[in-house]
Structures are given as structure tokens and as C-alpha cells.
Amino acid sequence: MSGIDKLPDLSDWLIVEVWTIEEAALLWAGINPLDAAGYDIGFGDAVNRCAANIRQRDKAKVLLRALKEAVSNGTLPFVKSYEMRDDYSNGAYEIEIGHPNTPDADLMITSRTRVQQAAVIKWAKTKNVLSYREEVRRADAIAKNKRFADSLNETPQKEIDATRLCLPPPPLLTENHPLAPAELLAATKVWETVVTDEALRSNGKTFKKNALRILNQDENYKAYSNEAKERIAVVVNPVKKGGAPKTP
């Protein structure tokens, strides 16, 4: 059984459009919030009880801190938030924080501060914060590749050579083929674009001019010299006689 198979199925949480930031931290750490009953009383204690390993526990706690700071600083928009305040007159009491204000990270009630699921995912992407599930998935892939490499090392050379002979060669006109010329590949792609793009076909310009337009504007061809672009445009032009014709 791989590491990812041991993780709980959290897919049902995708239908919950709004998460508390505690739920978000737990989910990102691969922990089912339903297993952390009463976590609003003591987030750290609940995580310690239900987390499978120390990596998940640490990830959940750090993420909660990061989410609190993000909401407080305004980099993660919130739906609703509350602070726990205390004074001599009223004792401890809750107060809702409304927009455009943001809650104080030190006073925030994390079990009642809610954020859109989509906003959390976008925030995590901009911070390049992998979920624990994604960390495990990548580790499984690395381990699988290592096992494959090890199996090759343990296999006699004759068997490896025989296996390679059974593999089909890479297609000719692809970047995977070691002998595919770069300009030929570029010419094929440019020709296909001019032929299939309805806007180019109806703009009244010649085939060659449309090809040069793609070569000069597309970032994929910025490394080509003007001479190379000219060569490619000549190659893709289907009619050479009588001057450059309009795109058919």
C-alpha cells in the first residue's frame, strides 16, 4: 500500500464552499476535521490526538498561524470573522469584525473565522504551499521511480536490451525524437496554425505574412533569428509561383 492510500478520503469537503481557517489548516495537512471534535477548544491538543504523524501535526499548526496572519493582513479575504476581547467591564466577549476591517491575528477566533474554499486554494497556490496529500503523492512517485531503477539494476543486461528492443521508437515529428530538426518542428506547427486558424485565413494577408506574424509574436519562437523565421515562412508557403498568394 502506498503512502497516499493510507490518507483519509477528504473529497467530500470539496462540496463545502466555506471553511473555517481551522478546517482549512487541518484539511491541508491531510487531517479530517471531523476527527478533531472539540478542536475549537484547543486546536493544538486536537491535532495531536488525531494526526497520523508529526509532519501532519506540524503542518496543521504552521498553516493555522499562516492563515491567521493572511486574514489579518488582508492577503486572504474572509467571509466572517470574530475576535475574543476582554475588558474590566464586560469580561470576555466576542465581537464580529466587518469589512473593510480585518481581525487582529492575536484576538481572532479561528474556529469562527470563515474563508471561501476557492480563496484558500488560490492563496496556497500563490504561496506554493503543497497540501500534505500532494507531498505524499510526489514522494510515492519518486519511490516508484526508484524501485523501477533498482529493478533495472538487478536485471541482467541482456534482458534490459531485449526490453528496449520491444519499445516503439518516438514519433518522428516530435521534440522527443533526437534527430528532429527544430526549424522543421517549428514549420510544422506554424503551417498547422495558419491552415486551421479561421481568423488568419480570412484576414486577407498572404500565407507567408501570416506565418511571419506567428513567428514574430509567439513567445515559442522568440529565440529564432530573423533569417530562420524567413526560412520557415518560405517553407510553409504552399504556393511559390507567381508571388506570395493570399492565405487559401
Image: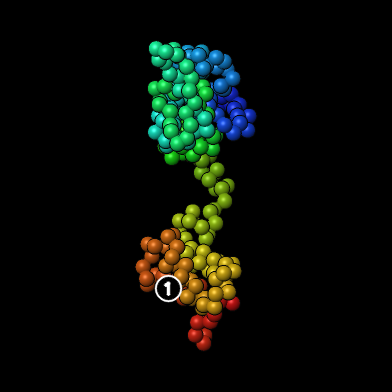
33 to 229, vertically: above or below: above
In the rendered image, is residue 19 in sight? yes
Q: In this orientation, which residue lies closer to the viewer: 131 or 227?
A: 131
Looking at the image, residue 186 sits to the left or right of residue 18; the answer is left
Residue 64, quarter of the rendered image: top left
Rendered view: 126 above or below 86: below
**Residue 181 at least partly seen:** no
Total numbered labels: 1
Q: Position of residue 79 (x, y in %)?
A: 52, 33
- Which quadrant: the N terminus? top right
Q: Which residue is depicted at the point 52% across and 30% down? A: 80
As displayed, is residue 216 above or below residue 243? above
Q: Quadrant of the C terminus?
A: bottom right
| Relative image position of residue 13 (x, y in whole percent) | 60, 29
Q: Which residue: 40% across, 25% down?
A: 105
205 to 77, vertically: above or below: below
Label 1 element class: helix
Dividing the picture into quadrants, the one containing residue 203 is bottom right
What's the residue at 63%, 29% (across, down)? 12
Comparing 137 with 27, the one in front is 27
Q: Which residue is mark 1?
A: 231
